[in-house]
C-alpha cells in the first residue's frame, strides 16, 4: 500500500521568512496530493491540493510543487505570519478512494 | 446540521466496554472515512466507505467495525475497547468524482480507554 513520509517533524521560522515542508510517497499510481492545516484543538482543513498532471500550484502565499519522477511533493509558505502556526499534513491518494497522510509537521512562526 | 457532526465530543471508557462513535453528514457526499490521530503518527485510516452499502478496511482496522446503511451516517464501533484505542477519532467525507476531492472533517471525538 501507499506510504507517505513527511519532513521535518517540527519547523520554527521567523515571521516573514519562508517555510518548506517536504513529502515523499511510494505508490507511483497516486495522483492526488492534498495538504491539510490543523490548528491546535481543531479539525484538519484542506488548504491546497495538486493533481499528478500539474507540476506546481499557487494560492496567495502558499504553493505546492510535485515531482512525479522522484515521487516527492512540497509545500511552500512565503511571508509567514503567526497565524500560519499549526500542524501541516501532506497526503497522497489514488483518485481519492482513500487518502494516506504523512505524520505531520509542527510549524511555529516566531513573531 | 452543517457539514459533519461527530458525537460524543469526548468519552472516558472502561476497557472491555463496547462503544459506538457517531458521524453524520448533510452534504450528500458519497464517501466517508474514519481516521485516528495519535501524536507522532499523524492521521491513520481505520475504515472507509465509498458509497452507501459498501465499506473497506484502511491501515489500522483491527478492533473496529463500521456500517453504512445510508448516505449520511457512518458509525464506528469498538466491540471491546482496549487502552491502545485511546486516541482522537476524526470522521471525514468527500465527494468522489467531483473536481475537488478534498475531505471535510468532523470536529473529532477524544476517546480515553482506561
Image (cartoon, rainbow, N blue to C red):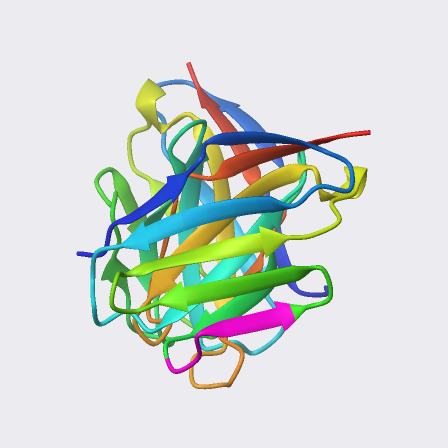
- Magenta segment: does it hold A75? no
Is B113 rendered above or below residue A108?
above
- The residue segment tinted magenta is A53-58
Is A74 rendered above or below residue B80?
below
Q: Residue furthest top?
A: B114
Residue at x-position 32% and y-position 23%: B84
Q: Residue furthest right?
A: A111
Residue at x-position 45% and y-position 27%: B39
Residue B40 x, y percent position in the rendering: 41, 28
Residue A72 x, y percent position in the rendering: 34, 57
- Relative placement, left or right, of B29 versus B67 is right
- Relative placement, left or right, of A65 versus A15 is left
Residue B33 x, y percent position in the rendering: 41, 59
Residue A97 x, y percent position in the rendering: 33, 71
* Image quarter in which the C terminus of chain A is found: top right
Is A35 rendered above or below residue A58?
above
User: Hey, which quadrant is residue A82 in on the image?
Assistant: top right
Q: How many callouts does the rendering have?
A: 0
Residue at x-position 77% and y-position 42%: A16
Q: Nearer the viewer, residue B20 or A108?
A: A108
Q: State whether residue B99 appears in this view.
A: yes
Q: Residue furthest left?
A: A1
Residue at x-position 74% and y-position 45%: A80
Q: Nearer the viewer, residue B31 or A18?
A: A18
- Relative placement, left or right, of A48 versus B80 is right
* Image quarter in which the N terminus of chain A is found: bottom left
Q: Nearer the viewer, residue B62 or A3?
A: A3
Amino acid at each position: 500500500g501507499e506510504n507517505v513520509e513527511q519532513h521535518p517533524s517540527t519547523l520554527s521560522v521567523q515571521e516573514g521568512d519562508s517555510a518548506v515542508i517536504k513529502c515523499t510517497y511510494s505508490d507511483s499510481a497516486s495522483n492526488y496530493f492534498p495538504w491539510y492545516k490543523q490548528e491546535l484543538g481543531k479539525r484538519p482543513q484542506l488548504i491546497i491540493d495538486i493533481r499528478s498532471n500539474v507540476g506546481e500550484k499557487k494560492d496567495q502565499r502558499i504553493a505546492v510543487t510535485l515531482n512525479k519522477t522522484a515521487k516527492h511533493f512540497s509545500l511552500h509558505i512565503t511571508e509567514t505570519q503567526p497565524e500560519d502556526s499549526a500542524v501541516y499534513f501532506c497526503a497522497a491518494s489514488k483518485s481519492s478512494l482513500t487518502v494516506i497522510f504523512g505524520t505531520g509537521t509542527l510549524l511555529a512562526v516566531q513573531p | 446540521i452543517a457539514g459533519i457532526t461527530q458525537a460524543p465530543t469526548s468519552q472516558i471508557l472502561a476497557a472491555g466496554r463496547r462503544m459506538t462513535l457517531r458521524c453524520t453528514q448533510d452534504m450528500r457526499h458519497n464517501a466517508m472515512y474514519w481516521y485516528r490521530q495519535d501524536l507522532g503518527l499523524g492521521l491513520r485510516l481505520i475504515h472507509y466507505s465509498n458509497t452507501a452499502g459498501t465499506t473497506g478496511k484502511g491501515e489500522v482496522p483491527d478492533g473496529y467495525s463500521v456500517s453504512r446503511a445510508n448516505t449520511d451516517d457512518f458509525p464506528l464501533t469498538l466491540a471491546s475497547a482496549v487502552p491502545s484505542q485511546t486516541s482522537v477519532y476524526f470522521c471525514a467525507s468527500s465527494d468522489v468524482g467531483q473536481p475537488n476531492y478534498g475531505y471535510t472533517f468532523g470536529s473529532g471525538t477524544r476517546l480515553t480507554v482506561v
